Amino acid sequence: MLNLILFGPPGSGKGTQALLLKEKYNLLHISTGDMFRMHTKNNTGLGLRVKEIMDSGELVPDSITIEMLEEEVRNNPQVRGFIFDGFPRTVPQAQALDTFLEAKGEKIDAVIQLNVSEEEIKSRISAREKISGRPDDDAVKLLKRLEEYFNKTIHVIPYYTSQDKVSKIDGIGEISDINISICEIIDGI
Ligand code: ADP
C-alpha cells in the first residue's frame, strides 16, 4: 500500500494536488473537510453535530473526526492506498491514525508539507470565497482557521519529523510544477 498525508494550511492546494495524485497513483482520496461538508449538506446526524463548529472555523472534536476517518478506511479494503487530506490535524489524530494503520499491518509512507505564506493564503481564500459558498471562507472565519492551524495542527509536523517522514514543498507556483515536485518525492519512497 501507499499511504500519503498532504499537509498544509487552509488554501495551500492540498485538495488540488490530491486530485492529480489519486489519478496517477490510483489511490483513494479522503478529505475529512469534504466528508464533513457532505454530511452537513445532507443533514445527517453527524452533519447536524458538526455544522456550527465548521462554520465557525474551529476544528471538529478528535473523537468524531477519528471515528469518521477510520470508518471510511474500513469501508475501502481493496484500495492501493490512501491520500489523507486535512487529516490528521492534531497530534492525537496522528497517533490514532498510526495505531489504526499498525493494527492493519500498514503505515504512513510520506507526509508532504505544502508551504504557503499567510499572505498568499488570505488572497487565495478571499478569491475562493466568491465561488465556494463556504461560510468558513469569510475573512473573520479564516482567521479562526489559521489560529487553529498554528495552535493545533502545526504540531503534527514534529510528530512525523521524528519518524523521518516529512518532505517540504514550495506550495506557490504552477500547479503542474508543484505536482512534479510531489511525484518526485513519492517516486523516491
Ligand atoms: P481547509 O480549506 O481549511 O483545508 P477543510 O475542507 O479541510 O478546510 O476543512 C474544513 C473544516 O472541516 C475545518 O475547518 C474543520 O472544522 C473541519 N475539519 C476537517 N478536517 C478536520 C480534522 N481532521 N479535524 C478536525 N476538524 C476537521
Image (cartoon, grey):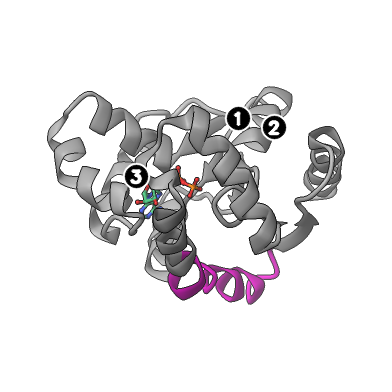
| x 81%, y 42%: residue | 178
The residue at which mark 3 appears reads as 70
The residue wearing badge 2 is 21
Disc number for residue 27: 1
Instruction: Please tell me whether residue 140 belongs to the stretch shown in magenta.
Output: no
Q: Do the residues labelled 1 and 2 touch (CB within 8 Å)?
A: yes
The answer as to whether callout 1 falls within 8 Å of ligand 1 is no
**Going by the image, does 139 lie left or right of 6?**
left
Residue 123: percent from left, percent from top: 64, 49
Query: Is residue 110 visible in this depiction of the protein?
Result: no
Q: What stretch is highlighted in magenta?
A: 149-165
Q: Which residue is painted at 46% across and 53% down in the image?
A: 139
Q: Position of residue 26 (x, y in %)?
A: 65, 25
Residue at the spot 32% in from the left edge and 52% down from the top edge = 66
- Viewer-nearest of labels 1 and 2? 2
Residue 95 x, y percent position in the rendering: 42, 66
Residue 58 relative to residue 28: left or right: left
Q: The residue under label 3 is which amino acid type?
A: Glu
Between the residue at mark 3 and the residue at mark 1, the CA separation in whole angstroms equals 16 Å
Distance, label 2 to label 3, CA atoms, is: 21 Å
**Labels 3 and 1: the sequence-earlier one:** 1
Q: 126 or 14, which lies in front?
A: 126
Q: Which of marks 2 and 3 is nearer the N terminus?
A: 2
